[in-house]
């Protein structure tokens, strides 16, 4: 028996996602669960202190639930960027979303106040080159007093435990959510493992481009708030 994490519009979402990773991503959490998770995260990262009219871009925005979370927190000038036309097409809200590559951002220099990435950097194919390009682009489009917020997977003891469970066939059969997570990991294995195996390089590169203001590692995530150097 599967658990009940599925979205009510799962069939429609999966029909839109022909890519197996995207189909698993869509059944991992309902939009509402994802929005609540993002709101809690953004609050922990201090988003409540940001001006509500800050120009914010959610990079690697996927189906845009991070944008919904920001909207619910009262932010009014929102944009999103993601490489997947099918995921971007699922976003319905006031933010302007672009299908584009975050290694080449479609924005002019020094025009954004806040750039947010939640679970996107670990999808970049080449480390350190693509991460360096993405961070350079972020630095380019951020205003001098701008902010970056990242939340990315990190190989903490908790994440090792999650990996062990997701590799268990019985757990996968019993839980649709664990099965979705395991499927996503299988399909992003190369970039995911590349990311998790190079923590020193990633932290060094982040510090080359951004001065850390607040950083913590918890529940399998690296949480980083910084300003451009
Ligand atoms: C794990 S999802 C994260 C989506 C969203 N931030 C979330 O947490 O739900 C990773 C996203 O990165 C996007 N992506 C991968 N490479 C990208 C690139 N080079 N530029 C822009 N988006 C990219 C994928 O299409 C996918 O939507």
Image (spheres, rainbow, N blue to C red):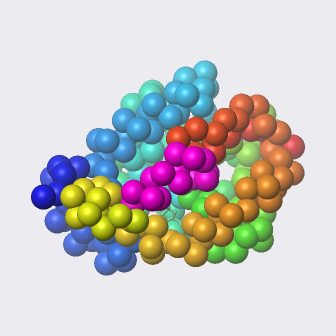
Q: Is residue 53 above or below residue 6?
A: above
Q: Is residue 144 above or below residue 24?
A: above
Q: Disc count in the image?
A: 0
- Residue 225 lies, in percent from the top left, at 69, 37
Please tell me in which quadrant of the rendered image residue 137 appears. bottom right
Q: Nearer the viewer, residue 74 or 129?
A: 129
Q: Is residue 147 above or below residue 63?
A: above
Determine the residue positioned at 60% across, 47% down. Answer: 156
Prevalent SS, magenta region = helix
Determine the residue positioned at 41% across, 51% down. Answer: 64
Determine the residue positioned at 78% across, 51% down. Answer: 203
- Residue 190 lies, in percent from the top left, at 58, 75
Please tell me in which quadrant of the rendered image residue 126 appears. bottom right
Determine if residue 133 is in view. no
- Magenta-colored span: 152-166
Q: Is residue 53 above or below residue 135?
A: above
Q: Nearer the viewer, residue 121 or 57?
A: 121
């Amino acid at each position: 028996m599967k658990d009940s994490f599925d979205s009510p519009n799962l069939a429609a979402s999966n029909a839109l996602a022909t890519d197996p990773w995207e189909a698993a991503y869509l059944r991992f959490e309902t939009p509402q669960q994802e929005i609540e998770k993002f709101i809690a995260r953004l609050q922990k990262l201090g988003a409540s202190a940001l001006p509500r009219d800050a120009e914010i871009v959610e990079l690697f925005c996927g189906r845009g639930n991070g944008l919904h979370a920001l909207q619910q927190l009262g932010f009014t000038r929102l944009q999103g960027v993601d490489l997947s036309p099918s995921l971007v097409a699922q976003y319905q809200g006031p933010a302007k979303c672009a299908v584009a590559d975050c290694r080449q951002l479609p924005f002019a220099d020094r025009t954004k106040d806040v750039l947010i990435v939640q679970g996107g950097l670990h999808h970049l194919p080449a480390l350190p080159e693509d991460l360096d390009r993405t961070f350079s682009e972020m630095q380019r489009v951020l205003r001098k007093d701008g902010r970056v917020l990242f939340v990315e997977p990190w190989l903490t003891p908790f994440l090792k435990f999650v990996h062990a469970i997701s590799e268990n066939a019985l757990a996968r059969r019993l839980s649709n959510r664990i099965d979705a997570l395991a499927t996503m990991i299988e399909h992003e294995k190369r970039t995911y493992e590349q990311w998790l195996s190079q923590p020193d390089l990633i932290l060094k590169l982040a510090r080359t481009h951004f001065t850390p203001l607040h950083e913590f590692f918890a529940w399998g995530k690296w949480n980083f708030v910084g300003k451009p150097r």
